[in-house]
Image (cartoon, coloured by chain):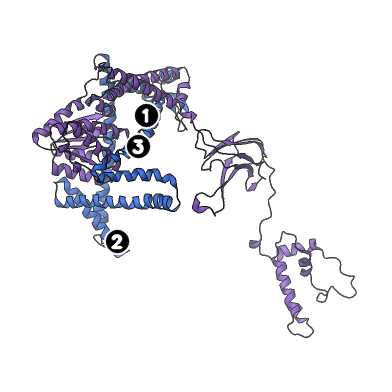
Chain colours: A blue, B purple
Amino acid sequence: MTASATAWISTDLWVWVAAIMTLAIFSFLYRDNPLYKFAEHLFVGVSVGYAIAVSWDRVFLPKIWTGLVLHRQWSMLPPVILGLLYISFFFPRYTWIARYPISFMMGFSAGVALPLTVVTDIFIQTRGTFYESNAAGDPLAPIISVAKFQEFAAHPGVLSALNALYGPLLLLGVVCVMLFFYFSHEQKGPLKVAGMVGMVYLMIGFGASFGYTVMARLSLLIGRIQFLLGEWLRVL
Amino acid sequence: MTRTLFSQQPSGGFTAQPLLWSVILVLALATPLYAEAPAATDSSAAPPASAGSAASPASPPPAAPDTSARQPALRYSSVTPEAAAPPPMPLLPPPTGILSAEDAPNDAGKAILVTWRPQSAPDDLTGYRLRAEQLKPAAGKANEEKPATPYVFEHSWPANQEEYRIVIEKLVPGVAVNVSVQAVAGDRYSEPSPVQIAVPKGNWFHTGKIPVGLALAVFIGFLLIFVQKSRSGAKLFVRKIAGLEAVEDAVGRATEMGRSILYVPGLSSISDVATIASLSILAPVARKAATYATKLIVPNRDPIVFTVAREVVKTSFNQVGRPDLYDDNSVFFITDSQFGFAAAVDGIIVRERPATNFFLGMFWAESLVMAETGAATGAIQIAGTDAVNQIPFFIVSCDYTLMGEELYAASAYLGTEPILLGTLKAQDAVKLLILGVIILGVVTSLVGSTALFDILRPPQ
């Protein structure tokens, strides 16, 4: 075993840096303090510096320098020109020029996002509400089917009941939640009832998601404590 | 043997003849065993007449060298088994069947579709091996002197299907691809089948996206109808949304307390719908802040979103006639690191102590970090996102939370522009349409029809 592995505390400089930074961030739980400020500014500075290095290495050198300057790939020219127009921000009289790349990016992004949203948020969700499918998207069985109720009648039990009710409950939830987000009418009468049922569905879903995510966050906290007590202090 | 040859030299000295014989012998040993050795090599392997005891003067004249009798001795006695190559396996007959190769539909011209329908196969067949080859031309002016490089694609299929289909991608548009199939039986291969040629071509239209186009056309149709109605002065009703009702109060509270407003437009890029919705809400919030002369702080994680946010805020201040209040430094970029950004926003919250925090847009794991810090400072907080996993955290740590669709509706709700209002009404109309499609789908699925399910299949 190496000397550092047998020491009662880590002798690795970078472990010490990581441990001190971790404690500096954790100190925010008490109150804002100079140690946290230092860690915060260091974090932001390092991340910006890293991003600049990555942009230089992954974007500027291969695409602009090698692609456009050395290999004369003219297809790189329009994005380079659009990018350069952003520099007009530094000249108050010509700030308006930056609106061209902004408009282009907004239009392009909306154009890309619209069909994808229709497919992922509408088509796939809608078809999944009335038919089960396999990974390839081929139909397997209807979500609501008489056969499932017949199965429940033949073999009454919790599993067969849940299997039979899964489809109707799913349909009820989808319809009620969509009506909850219907803004064109005041929520009165049946619409109010549907909206309340939709809200119950939403809160059940959010509660499950909350618990699941909190567990994941706790595992992250445990990971940091294991690092501090194990890799740094060597008491674990 | 070599010693015998040397010892029989009349002079007993070292001459060229034994050396020549030994070289010939080494060459003979080195000859591939299963190949037919040249006659000279074979004859050299036989002992010379002067050296062999069988070549006595009384013996009949030596017959022509019998290679068939000598080769086995060479093959098995002079070479170690490890050095011997395995005997050649007999080839399988070429596979019979229908091989078709054609341009893959609905693509940019970089793929072909290969179909193989075998008709007869030997009993010990274990599979098929597909081979496609395209001569890719050298690309780029700097590579003009480089020759075209062959791109070879190989794929193996097990022998248990009636038909095989595969899409071969990463091809060069407009350049022919040669496709052939070999039968495989264990480690034996057949001769390739006759070559099929396909040329990948780009398509202007993706026919699989026609339903998507129709859906968008319907939505745009609704949008135009409702925008026209709104512009013509028709009163379009929108029900109250609690979180948005509180925006006016939240801005007013910051004004009364003489503190700032923090507006975080999410951490995603401009291509995210939630970001676009957030920037739409930023405009009326900035107008209110300018009207009440309240300081507005807008930190950004994405450089493009930052530039848009700055334009939105600047324009809003101009719209209410207070360009003098606009501060370039109030809208700024921090870092694109997720938790670096969260740490910086936390610092802003505890140091600037804004009276009102808006967290509207796309958020990930940092949502609770920022919202909890804001709650600890006593600020009134309005959050909104379409990230389902983050809504629960906003609900527990913020005063008002806009859930998903409410975020999209907010810009229309806060403003009075006909286009935004028409958009909101069109969204509602589409929601009713989708509800109708779902109910129709349930009914058709009960009778066993998958037609509607297939129409809504995502394009491949």
The residue at the far top in this view is: A189
> Observer-nearest residue: B48 or B435?
B435
Marks 2 and 3, the one that precedes in the sequence = 2
Mark 3 surroundings: few (<14), some (14-19) or many (≥20) residues within 10 A: few
Q: Position of residue B12 (x, y in %)?
A: 76, 85
Disc sitting over residue A104 in the figure:
3
Label 2, secondary structure: give it: helix
Q: Are marks 2 and 3 in contact (CB under 8 Å)?
A: no
Q: Are marks 3 and 1 in contact (CB under 8 Å)?
A: no
Name the residue located 43 percent from the left edge and 44 percent from the top edge.
Answer: A75
Disc sitting over residue A5 in the figure:
2
Marks 2 and 1, the one that precedes in the sequence = 2
Q: Position of residue A110 (x, y in %)?
A: 35, 33
Looking at the rendered image, the quarter that the N terminus of chain B falls into is: bottom right
Report which quarter residue A147 is drawn in: top left
Q: Is residue B248 above or below residue A83?
A: above
- Give the letter of the chain under mark 3: A
Distance in Å between CA atoms under marks 3 and 1: 25 Å
Mark 1 surroundings: few (<14), some (14-19) or many (≥20) residues within 10 A: few
Is B50 left, or right, of B380 in this rendering?
A: right
> Observer-nearest residue: B333 or B428?
B333
Q: Nearer the viewer, mark 2 or mark 3?
A: 3
Tell me the kind of residue under disc 1: Asp
Report which quarter residue A116 is drawn in: top left
Residue under circle 1? A121
Marks 3 and 1, the one that precedes in the sequence = 3
- On the same chain: label 2 and label 3? yes
Name the residue located 21 percent from the left edge and 21 percent from the top edge.
Answer: B240
Label 1, secondary structure: give it: helix
Distance in Å between CA atoms under marks 2 and 3: 56 Å
